[in-house]
Image (tube, rainbow, N blue to C red):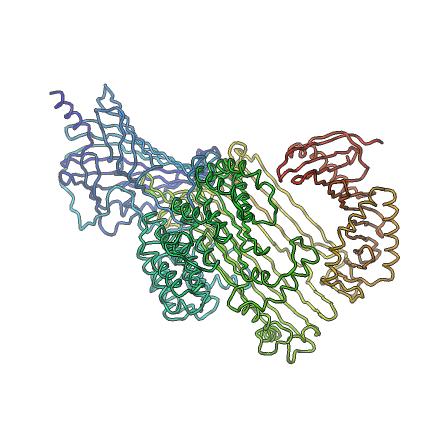
Amino acid sequence: MWGFLLCHLVALAEPGLNPKKTYEYRYEGMVNIGRGMPNLAESGVRLVCKVKIIGVSAQTFLLRVSNLNFEEFNGIPGKNAFDTSPKLTKRIAAELSKPFMFEYAKGRVGDIRTSAEISDTIVNIVRGILGFFQVTVKTTQRVYELEEFGIHGLCQSTYANEEDANSQELSVTQIVDINNCKKKAAIYRGMALAVDNKLSKERGDSVISTVRYVYTVKPTVDGGLIKKAHALERQHFSPFNVKGGNSKLQATKELVLLSVTDTVVTPAVGPMISRGNLVYKFVKVLAQIPILMKKLDDPVPKIADMIKRLAQANIYQTDSATSEDVVVLFQLLRVTSLENHEVLWKQLSGNDEHRRWLLDTIVEVADARVLKFLKNRFKAGDVSANEAGQTLLIAFNHVAAETDLMEMAKEFLSMPFSKSHPMLWNTVVLSYGSLVYRYCTYEYGQSCPVAVVQPLLDLVIDGLKRNNELDMVLALKAIGNAGHPSSIKTIRRFLPGVSATPVTLPARVLSAAVQSLRHLAVRDPHSVQDITVSLFVQRHLPTEIRMLACMILFETKPPLALVSTVTAFLLEEADMHVASFSYSLIGSIAKSSTPDNHFLSTACNVAVKILAPKFGRVSYHYSKAMHLDWFNDDFLIGTATEIFMLKNAASFIPTEIVTKGKFHFIGKILQLVELGFRADGIKELFRQNIQVFNGHLSYADFEAIFKVLQDWKTLPGDKPLLSAYTRIFGQEFFFADLNNDLIQSVIKTVSPSAGKESPVWSMIENLQNGMSWHWTKPFLMFETRYIQATSLGLPVEISKYYNTLTTITVNAKAAISPPLTDRLGQLLTSDVSLVTDGFAGFSKDQFVFHGINTAIFQCGAELKSKTVVAIPWEFSMKMNVKQKTFEIDLPACKEETKLFSVKFDVYAVSRNIEEPSRAKMTPMMPDSVEVQSLSKEKIITQANIYGAVFCVEFEATRSHYIDEYPLYYFLGYTNFACTIQPVQSNKPVDKIHIEMNASPTKYTVSVRHLLDTLQKLPKYATKSFHHSSSSSSSGISHQASFKAKEAWNGNSEPVFTIKVLAMSGNTKPEGYEAAAFYTPAAQMDNTQLIVSQIGEEANWKLCTDANVDKMHLRWGAECQSYEMSMKTATAHLPGSRPTLKAKIHWKTVPGYMIELGKSIEKYIPGMAFLLGFYQKHATNAKHEVSASVVAATGGSIATTIKVPDVGNTLALVINLLFIHSIISKTHFIKHYNGL
């Protein structure tokens, strides 16, 4: 009996609707996006309506919306109010007023059906309303957990029930964990190449969401009747750690029962189609870019007009005012069809500028349409190989990686046009590998089908069968880009000792095979660890391959046990290159602070302690690895830099040099840029020909190097001297070889004996006739989007866009006298003049958006940043190589030129499609808000003689929460600019004349002479160290030397002069002249530089006298006002330690230098303390800074720096001891000098 009653009570409370009743509710949904702080602007929308639910059958109900009102908010809460949007209200009401059919039973919403013309945006809003009816009520449990479907997907819900004894109603609270849903209604785009970093997420996250529902349920005979329901959803977002301040989205919705009546007549409905269940549906959501709202009807003429307008606006220089319109162009192209693309191609391809703009922007369609468009171009052959390569590279890396697109992309691997040019073929193969990587990331992960990578596996096996080195390398690089787990079996076939059959392949192929495991180190670390350890322990393998295996092994983040195994093996290692490389890599990782190396660095610390006694002082001549990084927990960002230099015992030339840069942010790791160089040919050249080389870079070493370089022609024409590759975001997109044939071709082309058959000859002819070259490149560098459903049925989006527009223009015309007749070498004896003008620069627009983005309205917070670099030029030039003269004339500065600027601010934005002109962008920190931090600075460097000033301006305003949250360092208006401006001068400046003259001199400075000088340096330095023991005799000697130089200068010709003059009509020019004098002496070569001001009554000069161990500087009126000297010396006498000393001494200096010294002086003790120094009292000469470096032990140096007190002759003596590049012992000594 009690069981029956219990079941009856459960049935009464379980939510249900009577098919013979009509329920009327009042619904209100509202969302706000902002900082959630007083006096900061926010934006939002509110939808209010009445909802009728009418029973049709036992499990089928009809929903209708009436009395709808849609409102927008943009302003400061408490000061501004919601404004009704009549046009948008009418548009939404027109769709919502139509009937929506849905299935409902036992608190579960089933299939939703509507007429076909209802938009996805409106259907999702209805899902938000129906979401209130998806609830599980259990009266037998007070607290319970369920995994159930809702508008956010399949997520975990926690319920708590409480019964009101008076009203007999249940209060049900539901908490939905939408941070860890199994099937989450969310989309990620643009981050496939970034590696997830789980350990970083444990320190904090950039996005946190919470959802809470509260129901009032009244038990009835028809089931639990929802009388009232309320939902609160919050999302906190920050580009950094949300703990340090964030942008907040708050969404609320409420449903209140107004009446329940008997259904008299069930409304008739027309044909309907299924729109799915309650889970939010993303359909064409990526088509709408969140940072703009434009009407997209009739796009073709708009696109053609915009391309023509943008091309014209940027025909000479970057028009930063139009750079944001490029994003509008992307939006328009995304709503066009393939047929539209073909129409645009026919209209625009005839004009070079318009053609380039179309090809550069159509790639951002980013779906099957752009691949079909490219396929048509390849088949028709109506694009050049260069155009095809650039377009395909970006298209393959930006296109949505979906199954049907993969099949389409495969076709490019078999098209004849793809193989028409080597560089185009490389681009096609490497780009396809990148597409496979993104496809597996988004669609499958570890279970990615092997069919997508099979074409690349076939290519590499075919290359192996034909023993074609280049084909094997290319295919392996593409397989490395793909990072497909099923490719490991194929990669094994190229690795000795790992392959089932013996392999003998060139080192370059083996290197490519090992490096092709780099992405698999993350996707399948255990398999990669097995392979790399197996390679590493085979001592008969090439040294380079073992080091690469070690490098890849540590990218798998091996556990302590595996690091210990490597450590034990290294203790028995005989190859010092492998030992040095491995030890330096382990030592660098041991100091790492990034989250991904948290456990690995601990294991490496243990390994370093074990290996240090044996390898702690290995010479720098051996192979090395270096890893440097930093990470900030408050911002959740960091960087890492890695440099690998791989050598072997056969040659001192590195076999391979690799440098990498990584960026850590919001729980992900992005590999920015990686550069790699192989020197197989150069290494072989030196191995065969060099006879005497001890690696000490002595005179004999340099002489041997020069001799070997003369024999580079002895290498085979097809063997590369040097190979290079570039990877961006972990994907290799370029590699090239520099071989014998290419070098000979270049030398033949530019040789002085080359004639009219040389391409350079035709270039010179074009230059004489007048040449004009222009290049513009719009490029969406990245578009990252994260879109998630909200309880209201509106999509919240976090997006980042970074668009660049680069422009280069060169106009030039040359004249040659006498003109060339038969060979290029005549240029060396002719007068050449050139007149040129042009521009080089770019405009970079960056946007970060957090808010609601639909096809009909947007609201949110938006960071908008613009960086502009503009370098215009206009000058004429004359030169004569034989006479060693060079002249440039620059026009005077007539108007302000902004060379560099950065401007950004954060806005509350509101836009709707019915009234796009009424879009609002309110600064998040309006002018009326109290400002805690206001910084405004302007630094001006004047050059009045030349009629121009260089200005640096900085202005920033920050909110009063800056001390509390790190995010607010970036909240507010910021403007930074560098400009050149005209200034009133004593005389109007017509032009600026620059003249350089390298006069013939009897003292010829040859390479051989420089080597001799380098060889003498240690001897000179040792002698000068003895002289420096007596300061008085040294001073007398120096003064005598300087007087002798002055007498000599009166009868000497300068070896080089340069004049920079402001020309003004027929008056005497003003400016500066610098002259350099050089004379070899028996014991010491001497150099002088004299800078003089030119003009009426000008007597300012700067005089320097220098040789290898000292320099004397004087300046002021006739070089007599101020004086300073610098001296260096080295010594390694018997019984003493090697020492390097340096000293700066001054007699008189300008007042501003004294003031600068005083301002710096107060920071010295604190800085010294922070760096680990300590102090003591000592004596130091007045007006002198000295430093000495002593080799304290075989692996350490001791440094002492003495700095006098500028005002009180207080001497600061700073001592520092370095041991193995780690500060071991420091002291800072402070005392007063005797007066």
Q: Is residue 819 left or right of residue 442?
A: right
Indicate whether 510 appears above or below 605: below
Quadrant containing the C terminus is top right
Q: Is residue 436 left or right of residue 723?
A: left
Q: In terms of image quadrants, where is residue 217?
A: top left
Residue 346 visible at all: yes
Q: In terms of image quadrants, where is residue 1093?
A: bottom right
The residue positioned 56% from the left and 58% from the top of the image is 841
Horizontal and vertical percent position of residue 751: 62, 73
- Looking at the image, which residue sits at the far top? 166
Q: Nearer the viewer, residue 1091 or 559?
A: 559
Q: Nearer the viewer, residue 1146 or 1188?
A: 1188
Q: Nearer the viewer, residue 326 or 44?
A: 326
- Looking at the image, which residue sits at the far left? 1
Horizontal and vertical percent position of residue 82: 39, 38
Horizontal and vertical percent position of residue 605: 52, 36
The residue positioned 33% from the left and 56% from the top of the image is 452
Horizontal and vertical percent position of residue 156: 30, 34
Q: In terms of image quadrants, where is residue 476?
A: bottom left
